Image (cartoon, grey):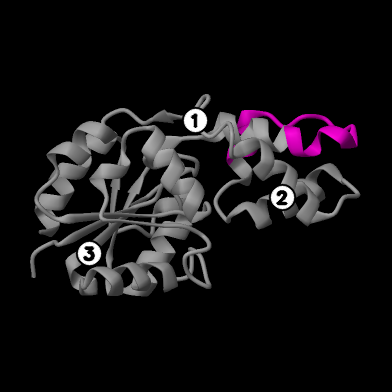
Amino acid sequence: MSLKLVIFDLDGTLIDSSADIANAINYAIGPYRVKPVTVQETIGLLGEGISRLMERIIDKEGIKADKDLLIERFLDYYSTHLTDNTTVYPGVREVLAQMPACRKAVISNKRESLSIKILEKLGLSAFFDMIAGSDTTEERKPSPVPVRHVLSMLGILPEEAVIVGDSNYDIEAGKAAGIKTVAVTYGYRSRDLLQGADFIINKMEELMKILKKIG
């Protein structure tokens, strides 16, 4: 069957949001007199959604704080500073504009409303038929549930779809849902965590050749 849907991860795949997330973390932990996290440290903490992010921060910094309070402080800051320093990775905009006539979707472990706002602010939302976040379904990546949800909503069979992402969570979710997987090496995870992908690319422009192979 021909390729009918390309699913993209958001952070670390389409955009680099690490600096804005680091700033939001540091705002959240500000009252607790702990060392601010760096952008590089933040990158190592990302991938499993905000709740897990705050759990990791509490463990890492030894903060005696309520997780829900930290989440609230994080969201208060982040929701008004979504794209202060966030950038679109090289080649992303061009590839989205040139892609074959197939549908496109985003599945992020960031909340749906934030994902939509970021894509709107960066002028990318018009490229996508559907944008799903960590709260769109009951489970998030690496669960296949979000992938299956998008396939169902768009009327696409697993063999007609591919997922593109920078982490093992994207690969695991895609494989469990029965779709092809493409890993990008320029994102937030090291190459050794991406070896399970069907294809690995070093820059977004290389995706076009992969899609031709698949479809």
Task: Tell me the quadrant of the picture where the C terminus can be found.
Answer: bottom left
- Mark 3: amino acid: Ala
Q: How far apart are the alpha carbons under marks 2 and 3?
A: 34 Å
- Mark 1: amino acid: Thr
Q: Residue at x 9, y 51 (%)?
A: 101
Pick whichever of labels 3 and 1 is earlier in the sequence. Answer: 1
Task: Tell me the quadrant of the picture where the N terminus can be found.
Answer: bottom left
Magenta extent: 27-43
Instruction: Give the number of the mark in front: 2 or 3.
Output: 2
Instruction: Bin the neighbour count of mark 2 within 10 Å (Cα to Cα): few under 14, some 14-19, many 20 and up.
Output: some
Q: In the rendered structure, are the residues bearing label 3 and label 1 in contact, judged by CB atoms less than 8 Å apart?
A: no
Q: Which mark is residue 37?
A: none
Q: Secondary structure at mark 2?
A: helix
Residue 24 higher or lower than 71, as above or below = above
Q: How many marks?
A: 3
Q: Which residue is mark 3?
A: 161
Pick whichever of labels 1 and 2 is earlier in the sequence. Answer: 2
Q: Nearer the viewer, residue 109 or 126?
A: 126
- Mark 2: amino acid: Ile
Q: Residue at x 27, y 68 (%)?
A: 179
- Residue 8 visible to an observer of this rendering: yes
Q: Which residue is mark 2?
A: 71
Name the spot of residue 191 as percent of width and height, x first. Answer: 43, 44
Q: Which residue is mark 1?
A: 83
Q: Is residue 22 magenta?
A: no
Name the spot of residue 212 as percent of width and height, x first. Answer: 9, 51
Left/right of residue 42 with respect to residue 9 in the rendered view: right
Q: Is residue 30 magenta?
A: yes
Q: How far apart are the alpha carbons under marks 3 and 1?
A: 29 Å
